[in-house]
Image (cartoon, rainbow, N blue to C red):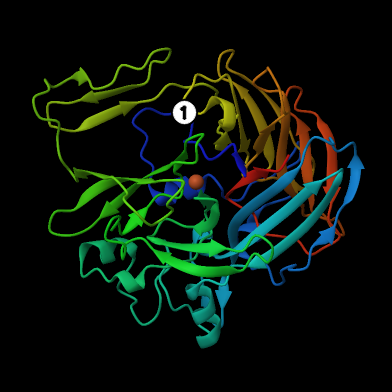
Amino acid sequence: MDFTNFCLLSVVVKEKKQMFSGTRYASRFMSRGCGSMSKYSNKDLLTKSILKDNSTPTQANIEGNLPLWLSGELLRTGPAVFEVGKDQMRHFFDGYAMLLRFTIKEGNVTYQSRFLNSDAYTKAFKQNRIVCSEFGTVSYPDPCKNIFHRFMSKFTVEEMSDNGNVNILPIADELYASSETQNLCKLDLETLKSTEKVNLYSRNNIAVHTQTAHPHIEADGTVYNLGTAFSGRSCYKIVQFDPSNGFEGKHPSHTMQLHSTTVGTEPDTDLVLPTGTSCRAVLKSDGCVHCYSEVLLDTGIELPRINYKEYNGKPYRYAYGISKGFGELLKLDVEDRTAVSWSEEGCFTAEPVFVPKPGANDEDDGVVLSTVLDVREGKLPYLLILDGKTFKEICRAVVPAEKWCLSLHGLFVSKF
Ligand SMILES: [Fe+2]
């Protein structure tokens, strides 16, 4: 399998010393209009549950010319279910996960979706209430606890949710739905069912309480991620998953103490000196490190992706992302600091995934895939395919099915 174009850190921020609290980060997704009109809002997509999945693959109707070289699976996950019984999730990031699968082969597209059968989801609907606390939602009967209190008080590993609604991780030729806890849900690609729960804390060679849902993947399949372990000597851990061993065998874990300062470095000095950018990380006299960003575009851009397969770890020119609360797709030229966009009235997009054309020489020679929800009455959802160079629509695969969720992240698995 060839895992194309995995997740990327944010590339554009507008303010210096920006604080990324969960609330502020989430506010970027808040209710907005889309396209040139502001008549339509994404509010319902962010707060109302998807009622039905689509576990049997459904043929999409192709409008336009789907490139025959494009062959593989677009897999995505996102928050979809926000109510259980009388309980209501309090944050978009907390919704129970829905997995999306688009199979592209020989000019055809099929669509399939399934609610992730995590323990958190299964127990909730068995007991008709939210059982496991999520990022911004506390579960009854612990109304005094939130996720931050849990870190500061007694930490119970069993409490951590396995609601994998943020990303899909490729580890040793298997796929796992992930949030940012230590729990991963192994997926069966054909059925989209979770077949195994992996608890990273219980693995002595890994032992992290949390890990990001945004690891980096080397070309050989090695996965690097940043985790945290909370104990008397809490620390960050960089965890490495070897492509041949998965969670077994030896996993070098590199530890750093939390809240440590850099010893032996003079205050007000740059800690890193990246080339080609004015971004800086400066150690101040009070021991804090202040990060200074560089504005690339005077427009917010979220969920950025690049040609990850060919340009991971290398200088790149193009990034693709969303803007206007999922209402617009952007292609950003980081050299010229310009952008082109795609939007359509009533349509809300998702993280754009770039897939390079086989044998391409140019960085942007390929296509950009994004799922689109058209909230106008009677309109169907579709998979949008844009030309990577022109950012113009090549085709759309319209799905005669119920609307899916606003997904956060995913990946394209090429099959040539
Ligand atoms: Fe993310």
Is 318 above or below relative to 51? above
At horizontal 51% and vertical 34% (from top left) the residue drawn is 219
Task: Please give left or right for residue 92 compared with residue 135 in the image.
Answer: right
Q: What element carries label 1?
A: loop
Q: Name the image quarter holding residue 411.
A: top right
Is 407 above or below relative to 292? below
Task: Please give left or right for residue 95 compared with residue 369 in the image.
Answer: left
The residue nearer to you, when weighing 383 against 293, is: 383
Q: Name the image quarter holding residue 265.
A: top left
Q: Name the image quarter holding residue 247.
A: bottom left
Residue picked out by circle 1: 14
The residue nearer to you, when weighing 52 against 203, is: 203
Whether residue 372 is visible here, answered yes or no, is yes
For badge 1, the amino acid type reads Lys
Which percent across, then down, holds residue 271?
24, 22
The residue nearer to you, when weighing 176 against 250, is: 250
Which percent across, then down, holds residue 190?
69, 62
